[in-house]
Image (tube, grey):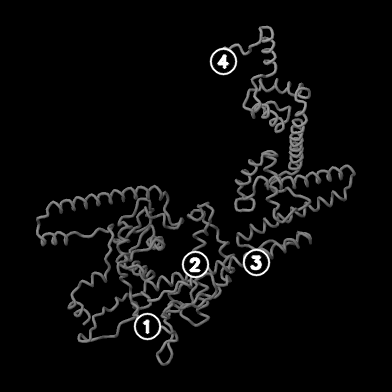
Amino acid sequence: PSKAFIDRARTLLPDEVGQEKLELLDEGFGDWTRSQFFHFVKANAKYGRDDIASIAADMDMPEEQVAPYSRAFWKYGPTELKDEWERFVTMIEKGEKKLEKQKKNAVMLKKFVSSFENPRHEMVFANKGTTYFALEQDRALLCAVDTEGYGNWESVRESIRHDNKLKFQHSVQGMTTAMMAKRADYRIRQVERELEAREKALKNQRPANVVAAQKALDAIKAMEKYEVDARTKELQGEEPPPMDSLDADARQVLEERQKERDQCVRRLREIEGQVSRCYLLAEETRQGIYRGDQYVNFSNINLKGGTTFTTAGGEFTFEVLPELESGEIEARLSKPLLKIPACGQCENCIDKGDIRKLCVRRMEERKRLIIAETKKALKAQGKPTTNIKPGMISTSSAAVSNANGSSNNGNAGNAKKRKSEFDLPPAKKSKSSWDGRKAPRMIKTANGLKPRVTSQGNKRMSIPDHAFPDFCRRIGPYGTHKRMELITAFAEEHPTTSVRQVTLKLGEITVKEPPACLDMTGVKPRAFTFYLAPRYYKYLPAEERPKDWEKYAKEDEIRWEKVKEEERLKKAASKKDKNSSGGDSESEVGESASNVSPSIGEEQDDTEDERDEVEPVAKKLKVES
């Protein structure tokens, strides 16, 4: 017969025998395969023989098909499977024992955790265990196991990883599920012994042991509470509370912990002082590059010790405050800075990222205190305290030569040939002796005349990004009527910035009319006052910003974008007209170009020295004479 006939008839036996065969196949689950049978056995070992719903879900089959198969398996298995029955039963019973252990551990852990009102903060153990796991880590682990269920180690691991209190404890974050299961089993065995000890103590009525255990628990709680209070007070710049309320054992443990912590804090302060010194040396190296030193020493910028440094060519020497290097200044400034309350409004306070920075208010006070420490050191050495740099005893002073006029440094001969742009020219020269070199421009400051850097080649001397917020704070929301004094003072404090670029930036970020967000009640406006545009209020300290300044800053930003777009369109139209009238003479082009005034918003790349270089030599002679 054909295959189609066999599939349709399902048997080739006579009708009576064939019908009996079909009935037996229907009773014996003939549509179940061998792979489904082994899957059923493994599911029984995993969930237990009575959990039919979980077995059916694991096999992805309806419960109505699995339930009768399970009844038939346990009824006819011993007689029908004979040789393999013992192996299957052993496998299932082993899994059921494991499930029973999990249930027992879960019930016992639930009972132990529920004995504490706040287990995450109050749970304690009679045995501290190993030194690789802190009490806080064991608390978090057992609470996660109690919540997610014993055996659900992947869920426990995710719960531990997302715990905010364990976010920076990398030993816990890197634990595998096997490590967590092993640690949880260790603690649960201890919990079992503790529960048995409690029940035995209550049964035998041993109040002395109960009192001793309670005393130990109270001592642990008191020690933990003291650590929390001490940490809170230290973060507020206060002294930690005394240990009088603790017993002798707890006091000894805390003193050992304090010694270990002091060593870490001392080393961190040394590293912080070394990093501060590296910043100072980096700034001095950058100034050397701006001066045009032939040799620039980058090897000084490291975390190695030392306070006195000399440039590679021997032209300049500078000394860093020794107490800044050793971390003593940071230790003295720590408490005064922490006593200052954080503003809660600056970017450093609002930012809740992984790397937290000190509040802007505290940073400003830290800079002021370091300046005071520097002045104190300078006065002790009899040195002037004007124009100092925080943390620097002496900055960029020329190296001392011997009596014969030769420098102690071997490169002194070359150092004499290298002319710094800060060196002053001779007092006066006649026209006949003029050597063609230009005298540096001088600027009048509070300390007298000083040479001013007006050119760095092709580098535009604009205001750097780190100094721009300070420039905005000098102007302030209510503006300034001392325009040139502000520009000159800022250019003096930032020698890498030209007066011209500061003037251009001032015209760009200021307006002549007071913004609408300013409260001008009782304020008499002057004739020529330059007010800071609202779009730059974000660079001001939080206490100086006007009310609802964000709305006005957004409107001002939109207005400024429109102005820039109009200027761009005008420039494009002017360029198009210029290209269309290519037949015009050069004189007409020059005349039209001279009548166009530069826009404040456009970038100006030329500097004063670059314009002076194109002047005739005769004009230079006339000016110097």
Mark toward the viewer: 4 or 1: 4
Earlier-in-chain disc, 2 versus 3: 3
Mark 2: give few (<14), some (14-19) or many (20+) Cα within 10 Å: few
Mark carried by residue 396: none
Earlier-in-chain disc, 3 versus 4: 4
Q: Residue furthest right?
A: 204
- The front one of 295 and 244 is 295
Tell me the kind of residue under disc 3.
Gln
Mark toward the viewer: 1 or 3: 1
Q: Position of residue 518 (x, y in %)?
A: 38, 53
Q: Secondary structure at mark 1?
A: helix
Q: Residue at x 50, y 60 (%)?
A: 361
Mark toward the viewer: 2 or 4: 4
Name the residue that disc number 1 marks.
414
Name the residue that disc number 2 marks.
367
Mark 3: give few (<14), some (14-19) or many (20+) Cα within 10 Å: few
Tell me the kind of residue under disc 4.
Lys
Name the residue that disc number 4 marks.
3
Q: Residue at x 68, y 12 (%)?
A: 23
- Mark 3 → mark 4, Cα distance in angstroms: 87 Å
Q: Secondary structure at mark 2?
A: helix
- Mark 2 → mark 4, Cα distance in angstroms: 95 Å
Query: Can you say which quadrant of the picture contains the C terminus?
Result: bottom left
Q: Secondary structure at mark 4?
A: helix
Name the residue that disc number 3 marks.
263
Earlier-in-chain disc, 4 versus 1: 4
Earlier-in-chain disc, 1 versus 2: 2
Q: Residue furthest top?
A: 16
